[in-house]
Amino acid sequence: MVADSIPARRPALPESRARRRRPVRTLLGAVLALVLAGAAPLAASAVPAAGSTDRSPVSASAVPTNSVSVAVAPVSLKPLHAGEDLYLTVTIKNGTADPIAPGTIDLYLAERALTSRSALNSWLRPEKTGKPGDLMKSEATKAPVQPDSTEIITVTVPADSVGLTTGNAWGARGIAVTLTDNGDVLAQGRGTFVWYSDEELTPVNVAVVMPIAAPEQTTGLIPEKALETFTSPTGVLTRQLEGVIDRPVAIAIDPQIIVSIRVLGSSAPPSATAWLDRLTQAKNEIFPLSYADADLSLQTQAGAATLLAPTSFDQAIDPTLFTTPTATGTPTPTATATAPPAASSTPVPSGTPTAPAGPVGGAAPTTEQLLAWNYTATDIGWPHEGSVAAADLPIFAAGGLGTTILSGSNASQSDSDITPNTAVALGAGAGTGLVMDDPLSKALRTAAASTSDDAWREAMAEVGSQLAVVSAEKPGTTRTLLATFDRGWPPSAARLSQTLDALAALSWHAPATLAAARATTTTDVTFESRTEPAERTELAKRLLVREADVAAFSSALTTPLPVTAEHRLILLSLLSNSWASQPGSWRDAVGTNLVDSSALLRSVSVSTKGPINVLGSKVDIPVTLDNTLGQAVTVRVQVVPSNGRLLVGSDVESTIEAQSARTVLVPVTSAVGNGTVTLRVTLFTPAGTMIDQPALIPINVRADWEGLGSLIFAAAVVLFFGFGVWRNILRRRRERDEPDTSTDPNATAAPPASSNTAGTEPNA
């Protein structure tokens, strides 16, 4: 695909020249080295002689699987002038299992100048392979390219073969390369360079922002060992800071790094305290990210009514580490940030170092002291790129973030051929947006993460071309753009300083402060609402619901702040932007957190299982409560029977000491009948929040056992005494029926009367 046609900017090459293949020009290596030394001081390494090759093996992962690719880039980032030869590097990568036989490299110049951003992007990333342009030179490769390897060939295109003269206007030009074998095209690649004819340039102001954040973790504070690794000479934080310190780059710092170093007191790794000292001395603009770089949009779209922030670090402080003042190289603590600096072409220092914000006179630091820093601005928010919804902006503004950094996908413009300024008004109550230039940012990020010289030159050539197009769009009109480096710094990224140096050397570029970028607004851009992925939002909702559960549960604790503060820090770390590129790992981390927090919510429980026999009309049922926490809890015990056989009195409140169990007695009254009853025992916090799920205790009720026993006992008593009375009556009756002989001891009993003497008188 070709760009817009502007014939005056580039006359077509003569047909005879375009069609014939030119012989390869071979220059002496020493002569070419001298030429390149003067023409290309910014090249990453010495350039071999024309036509020479640099073979270096690469891993299979660096080459597309089962493919052959070819790329082209200028050796020098300086613009090409009339009469100068064009020095190019052609990189051939063989990702197949077979060697590539020697073939032919054809170099082309785009037919038309690249006069718009859309034309430039279409040239570099065409939807389909089109005409590559006018042939400038053909050159045969001298050796096969082995499997899983790369070969870099340096080619010199003579000035007359380039075909550009002083009559061509300055700006970005497209170049293309094809690798052919016996007429068959194996691969095609495209690149750019900048042509300059001594016109008056209008530099493009570019504000650059670099986020400095630690890799993803789930602890809320960076562990000591990790800090030591991150701040080592080759650590990720060291490489990030080294690349931007004292350069015209605004630093977006994660406060978690500062706090994690300060909270360790005298036990902080020396490399970490030295790193913090260097940050203190930096002359860069510095503004804070959210703690742990928690995604602002993810918070609001998951249901947070306000932006989340740490509540306390007291639970993480060991007072013995602050017995004497420790020089942690931090600025004087202040609750308010300094005002943003006035717009200028150079960065504004973030403040001179003063006394540390840590312990004073041996005292442990407060939460405010741990978070304090002399920022140049504190009202800038940087949510996840391309995921900001319209409803998020008022919440950002209400949380003190009146300026939001947005990606280009969150904005649209009326004229796509003219690049607007970065600042845009977002509407009443929504603040201001700083829309980053996505193509420029992507090219800078690619350059900084490049692992080879040729890949770096290719990316930086695009950076120069992007800025050249913007500069030439509206001559005499100054524009201010925003470019950002990305989060999640790869371990292999080692070209940050080299990239920034090359950017600063471009004559059509001028460094700008973040304050200056915020001051230049445009009306040609409108906000485009975007949302986070549905799965990511759903998991975040579960995290926020769980935090609400933990906060409600904590009202039962004697000292709730250590529990809620630690959980908040872990939540913020799980919402970090660094997890966005690792959805699988983040899902696992969220699941682990939900399991751990469930154990916290179940740390106070009912251990009584039953069954329990109730044999009386009024009894006290023992219920044992367990507390596995490291502090005492106060709970209210509510018992509800499943039916009317038992009546339960009012709730019972009890305090359970740390790591212990306690039995409470719940009074119950038997009502009607015998049978089984299930008691539902529920624990509540003093504020009325239910703790865990209710426990069910089976009860066997024998409500009439006491009355029946009394009746049996009474009957036994009655029978016992009745039997005694009955025996006494019988005895007395016998005594009355027997004659009394106790008055005449000599008397004898009369003989029994005979029937034949009845009625006769005895003898006198």
Image (spheres, grey):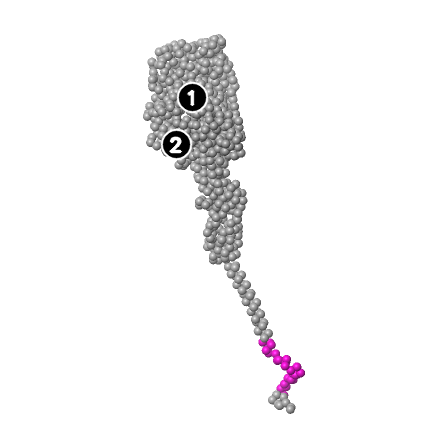
Question: Between residues 724 and 53, which one lies in front from this camera angle?
Answer: 724
Which quarter of the figure is the N terminus placed in?
A: top left
User: In the figure, 394 relative to 81: above or below?
Assistant: below
The x and y percentages for residue 755 are: 62, 86
Helix, strand or loop at disc 2? loop
Q: Position of residue 7 (x, y in %)?
A: 34, 14
Return the residue found at the far bottom: 764
Name the residue located 41 percent from the left edge and 30 percent from the top edge.
336
Q: Is residue 325 above or below residue 115?
A: below
The quarter in which the C terminus is drawn is bottom right
Q: Residue at label 2?
A: 400
Hey, what amino acid is under mark 1? Answer: Pro
Q: Residue 455 at what x, y percent from top left? A: 46, 19
Give the residue type at disc 2. Gly
In terms of image quadrants, where is residue 518?
top left
Say whether residue 516 is left or right of residue 763: left
Residue 537 visible (yes or no): no
Cα gap from disc 1 to disc 2, whole angstroms: 26 Å
Residue at image x 51%, y 57%?
Answer: 616
Q: Residue at x 64, y 82 (%)?
A: 744
Q: Secondary structure at mark 1?
A: loop
In depth, the one of 436 and 660 nearer the eye is: 660
Taking the magenta stretch, the answer to whether it contains residue 642 is no
The answer to which image quadrant residue 536 occupies is top left
Residue 351 shows in the view: yes
Q: Residue furthest front?
A: 361
How would you classify the magenta stretch by its main secondary structure? loop
Q: Is residue 743 magenta?
A: yes
What stretch of residues is rendered in magenta? Answer: 733-756
**Residue labelled with disc 1:** 248
Is disc 1 surrounded by few (<14), some (14 to 19) or many (20+) residues within 10 Å? many
